[in-house]
Image (tube, rainbow, N blue to C red):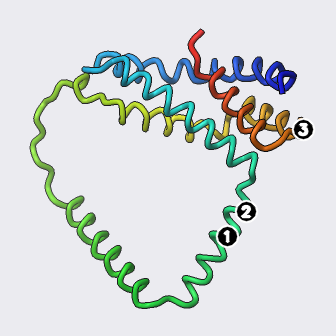
């Protein structure tokens, strides 16, 4: 396990250089909020949790998840019951209301202090969204997961290695 950490740590450090320029402006906005440490920490936590979840999903394979989901959707699509039709009606009505609200004329907006709107939840969601959007280009992360798969460790040790990678990725230097 230690040997694996020594291999993936430099990869995580290299990977962390890609997120720094992207997070500077949002981090500055969060640091100007009412709770700067909490909001900035939430952004970092969003990045960390998303990396951890994506790494675990990649490790355990999304194929099994999609096979189960596909079977459930196939069954639901070919043999709907009354509850399914009711759900479709509710979704249809919700879409009509959303379309009606979008087409309504815009209301005059009040000017607000942008820095007071930044919240820890918004910071977390921004960090998570940023990570999800950038995941297709996270080649160092994929290389680290490849090294974890090649190490052939027990599942819990691999999950701990993914957690360590994420920690090395987000810890400030």
> Which x, y percent locates residue 17?
63, 18
Separation of residues labelled 2 and 1 (CA atoms):
6 Å
Residue position for label 3: 150
Count of numbered marks: 3
Q: Is 76 above or below relative to 27? A: below
On residue 91, the disc is none
- N-terminal of the pair, mark 2 or mark 3, is 2
Secondary structure under the numbered disc 3 in the rendered image: helix
Question: Which residue is at 31% across, 76% downward?
Answer: 90
Residue position for label 2: 64
> Which x, y percent locates residue 74?
62, 81
- N-terminal of the pair, mark 3 or mark 1, is 1
Separation of residues labelled 3 and 1 (CA atoms):
27 Å
- Residue furthest top as drawn: 173
- Rate crowding at label 1 as few (under 14), some (14 to 19) or many (20 or more) other CA atoms within 10 Å: few
> Which x, y percent locates residue 76?
55, 82
Question: Which residue is at 67% across, 62% downward?
Answer: 65
Residue position for label 1: 68
């Amino acid at each position: 396990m230690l040997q694996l950490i020594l291999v993936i740590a430099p990869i995580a450090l290299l990977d962390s250089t890609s997120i720094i320029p992207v997070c500077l402006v949002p981090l500055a906005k969060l640091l100007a909020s009412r709770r700067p440490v909490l909001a900035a920490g939430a952004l970092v936590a969003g990045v960390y949790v998303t990396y951890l979840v994506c790494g675990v999903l990649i490790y355990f394979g999304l194929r099994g998840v999609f096979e189960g989901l596909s079977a459930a959707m196939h069954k639901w699509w070919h043999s709907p019951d009354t509850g399914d039709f009711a759900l479709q009606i509710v979704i249809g009505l919700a879409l009509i209301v959303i379309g009606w609200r979008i087409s309504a004329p815009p209301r005059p907006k009040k000017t607000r202090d942008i820095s007071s709107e930044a919240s820890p939840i918004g910071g977390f969601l921004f960090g998570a969204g940023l990570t999800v959007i950038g995941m297709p280009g996270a080649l160092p992360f994929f290389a680290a997961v490849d090294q974890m798969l090649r190490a052939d460790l027990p599942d819990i040790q691999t999950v701990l290695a993914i957690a360590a990678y994420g920690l090395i990725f987000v810890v400030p230097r």
